[in-house]
Amino acid sequence: MRKDTITGRSFPADFLEPYRYVGDPAADLVIAAVADQGGHATVGPLMRFLTDYDDFDLTAQPDAVSEFINGRSAFPESIDKDQFKGGIAFFWKHYQLVSLLLGTYALPYCYAGANGARVLWISERIKNNTFQRLEETGAFVFGIMQERDWQNGSNFVRIAKIRLLHAAVRWFTLNSGRWETSWGHPVCQEDMAGTNLSFSFIILKGFRKLNMTISRQEEESYLYFWNIVGGMLGVVPELLPKNMLEAYRLDKGIADRQFESSEAGRGLTKALLRAIEKQITSPTMQSLPAAQMRFFLGEKIADILAVPEVAWEKGFLKLALQTPIFPTLMSLQKPASPVLEKYWR
């Protein structure tokens, strides 16, 4: 066997099925404790704290919340810090293109998972406050890529808050009266693993679709970085891929089980497109985000999500792919959002 041959686990349906019904027990216990003090009246204010990107002050929070966050203020003992830093270095080397891929590939890709998308649709946060939700996602990604915030501990708090936010969304969804058990568990392990892949493996797939050359070491480091973050977010180790082959197999396994057309997926994609299009000032380029989505997602998934077909931009994309300026043309510029601007380099 060649030394560079990659091997890894497979993720068949019977392996993934149990994870459809498992949430994040440690975080769920915290939210249950908060809910016991007053139900919606206590979980609601906690949600506002958990979605505030700048508030790391725990003094006004319930004891269960403070204990949970303070108990997760360090890296795993087995972490390879050089590889972890390599993932951060890869991000900052390509951060503008990664930003594009997050908006036009990774996020809509998640919406193709019908059961997972239903959670987002029921919560209505993305549907009604799309740009704010995009700001939150951007602030989280750019925040955890700040080396200083790992050194001063802010990122441990940031990640623990997101983990509790997922548990709070899970609690609200289960108590909404709109969730069907046939969909599995809201924000389940399978969906959490798929989301983690969208931030890592799907981004790397985007580079490959653009025929951009990146080294295996860069790929492995970026995947490793998100594995560490994914573990901190509560994804079980069994659903964290050890290499690109495992990531491919896990992604395919989840997609084969979960990707199908749904009102939630189509609605979320439509809201996302509108939010992105509003940031484009040139009338002749208004349809470009839809073309970008179709290029990255492929026709099958784009059709599942009802991404509009735009013939002119398709021709532009095919032409641009033949030129070295393609990544520059498609990259985002410095954001107008004050939330994101402070993280931009």
Image (cartoon, rainbow, N blue to C red):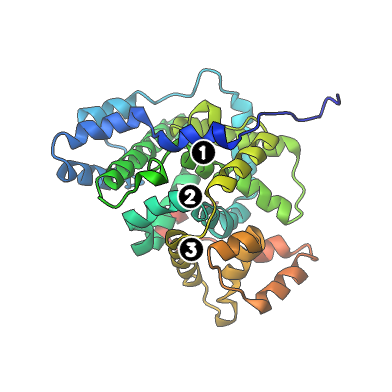
Residue at 21% in and 45% down: 45
Q: Between disc 1 and disc 2, whose residue precedes?
A: 1
Is residue 264 left or right of 164 when viewed as pictured?
Answer: right
The three-letter code of the residue at mark 2 reads Tyr
The CA distance from mark 3 to mark 1 is 20 Å
Label 2: element kind: loop
Q: Between disc 3 and disc 1, whose residue precedes?
A: 1
Q: Residues within 10 Å of mark 3 (few under 14, many from 20)?
A: many
Q: Which residue in the protein does label 2 denote? A: 343
Label 3: element kind: helix
Viewer-nearest residue: 27 or 84: 27
Q: Which residue in the protein does label 1 denote? A: 193
Is residue 154 left or right of 35 when viewed as pictured?
Answer: right
**Marks 3 and 2: CB-CB under 8 Å?**
no
Q: Residues within 10 Å of mark 1 (few under 14, many from 20)?
A: many
Q: Between disc 3 and disc 2, whose residue precedes?
A: 3
Q: Is residue 317 above or below residue 174?
A: below
Q: Nearer the viewer, mark 1 or mark 2?
A: 1
**In x, y percent, where is residue 276?**
49, 67
Viewer-nearest residue: 233 or 285: 233
Q: Nearer the viewer, mark 3 or mark 2?
A: 3
The CA distance from mark 3 to mark 2 is 26 Å
Residue at 66% in and 29% down: 9
**Is residue 61 at least partly visible in the picture?**
no
As drawn, the label of residue 269 is: 3
**Is residue 211 at least partly visible in the picture?**
yes
The three-letter code of the residue at mark 3 reads Thr
